[in-house]
Image (tube, rainbow, N blue to C red):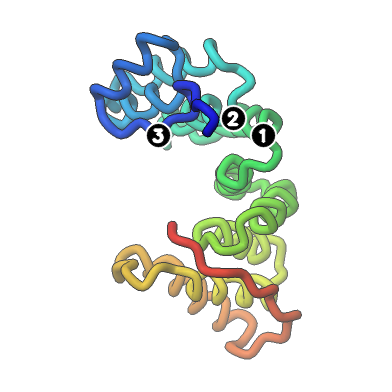
Amino acid sequence: MAKKNASQLTITSRAEAEEALRHDPANVPALAVLSGLDKEGAPALARRAIEGHPEDARAWLLFARSIPDAHRERRVEPLVRAARADPTNAVALNDLAWELLGTGRATEALPIAAKAASLAPGRSAILDTLAGALEAVGRCAEALRVEHRAVDVLSESTDDAARAPYLERIGRLEKRCGPRAEAPPAPAAPPATR
């Protein structure tokens, strides 16, 4: 069995994070745990991650997520860097597409959201982003089909509050293009936990 280095381990507690940081002061998973525990210190911890590991998509994701909502347009560049660092990271691609949508750049968001969905076809949040991009560029029938798929892959344990935004999009799309909008069927994908 191959030995994992500290950056590959799953770190779940402050003690584990502090131990990992003794070996690598810029350990991205460790800094992510600490930033989750210290929201005010999160930006400095994220900067430490990207300075120590500029090639690591997770560092750029951490940095982008440390940027407050009031400055969401500033998230785009670090998310571009995350996607470049790992073009197969569906989360990085999804976050980038989501931020592009949120800043009115749906045409740019659509191919990125589509790639994320091709990499993670069983992730409801990623499918929801793709549906949002399709909706924003006027492809209503496809958006409705994809959003139905997003709901289908939600975990059965998903509560009503978390399910509501998906159902709201479906309602909005059905009003706009009808409940039986014609679009090619979605490719089957196994459900995944979120």
Residue 177: mark: none
From the viewer's perspective, tell me whether residue 110 is left or right of residue 131: right
Mark 2 in CB contact with mark 3 (< 8 angstroms): no
Q: Position of residue 70 (x, y in %)?
A: 42, 34
Write the residue at 54% across / 30% down: 2
Q: Which mark is residue 86?
A: 1
Per the image, the residue denoted by label 2 is 57
Task: Count the marks.
Answer: 3
Q: Locate residue 41, reporting x and y percent.
A: 31, 19
Alpha carbons under labels 2 and 3: distance apart: 16 Å
Residue located beneath label 3 in the image:
10
- First in sequence, mark 2 or 1: give its number: 2
Where's residue 135, x and y in %? 64, 66
CA gap between label 1 and label 3 equals: 19 Å
Residue at point 53%, 17% (across, down)? 50
Q: In the image, what residue type sits under mark 2?
A: Ala
Dot placed on the residue nearer the N-terminal end, 2 or 3: 3
The vertical placement of 89 against 170, above or below, is: above
Q: Are the two marked residues, 2 and 1, in contact with CB atoms closer than 8 angstroms?
A: yes
The residue lying toward the viewer, choosing from 79 and 170, is: 79
Image quarter hosting the C terminus? bottom left
In this view of the protein, which residue sits in the foreground, 116 or 162?
Answer: 116
**Amino acid type of disc 3?**
Thr
